[in-house]
Amino acid sequence: MPERCLVSVCGIDDAGRGSMMGPLVIAGISIQRRKLKALTSIGVRDSKQLTPASRERLYCKIISLADNHYIAKIHPRSIDASVRQHGLNDLEAKYMALVSSKLDSDVSYVDSCDVNPQRFGKKISQMSGNTIRSYHHADSRFIVVSAASILAKVTRDESIKRLAKNHNLGSGYPADPTSVRFVKSYYSIHGSMPSFVRKSWRPILRITG
């Protein structure tokens, strides 16, 4: 569909894909094309370029501007099942298709986790029945995906904050020494991992044997 004919556009992005623990979050917003400049004017950009405080401030503003939004959280149990079948990209495509279907815009822009963005977009399109445009680094190329990245990141951070009320687990990423210490200590004491840890992740497998 030509760009000039688009009335409503959707942006979809994820947060937490590489983490050892907590959910993988897929978020999307739908917005009228004429309102995209308003997202820029309030300071929306790729969530990785923003401070936590800025993301939290923009979260409510984005929801207020958007026509609709939808956020899905994928539990570590589902992530582990997909990883063991070498299907993490398929799992993410499935949930991006769900978000696209819920928002039902003229076109959905998605941030591709597949090395082949066209293949990834085609898969989501087949699942959702919607027009999908998939790109690498879409969160920095398209303002509507930048907005979705903020919703995903804030939601993911809130999930980790709730877990951190009872555990000193850091950010949840393998590069975080606090997170690594937590999983090592937990396993040495309990002989197992808590339900919020992704047991199929290589750093976890190295600990559990």
Image (spheres, rainbow, N blue to C red):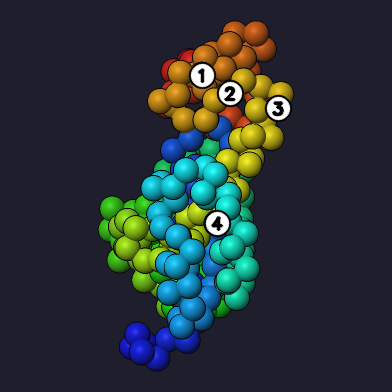
Q: CA distance from mark 2 to mark 3?
A: 9 Å
Q: Considering only vertical position in the picture, is 100 above or below 1? A: above
Residue 169: mark: 2
Residue 165: mark: 3
SS of the residue under disc 3:
loop
Q: CA distance from mark 4 to mark 3?
A: 24 Å
**Marks 4 and 3 in Cβ contact (< 8 Å):** no
Nearer-the-camera pick, 65 or 28: 65
Q: Considering only vertical position in the picture, is 193 above or below 5? A: above
**Marks 1 and 2 in Cβ contact (< 8 Å):** yes
Q: Give the residue at mark 4.
A: 58
Asked which quadrant contains residue 123, the reply is: bottom left
**Marks 4 and 2 in Cβ contact (< 8 Å):** no
Q: Give the residue at mark 1.
A: 178
Of tags 4 and 2, the one toward the viewer is 4
Circle 1 packing at 10 Å, graded few (<14), some (14-19), many (20+), is some
Where in the figure is residue 175, as x and y percent of width and height?
A: 40, 25
Tell me which label, 1 or 3, sits earlier in the chain.
Answer: 3
Q: CA distance from mark 1 to mark 4?
A: 28 Å
Residue at figure coordinates x 59%, y 63% from the top left: 61
Q: Amino acid at mark 2?
A: Leu
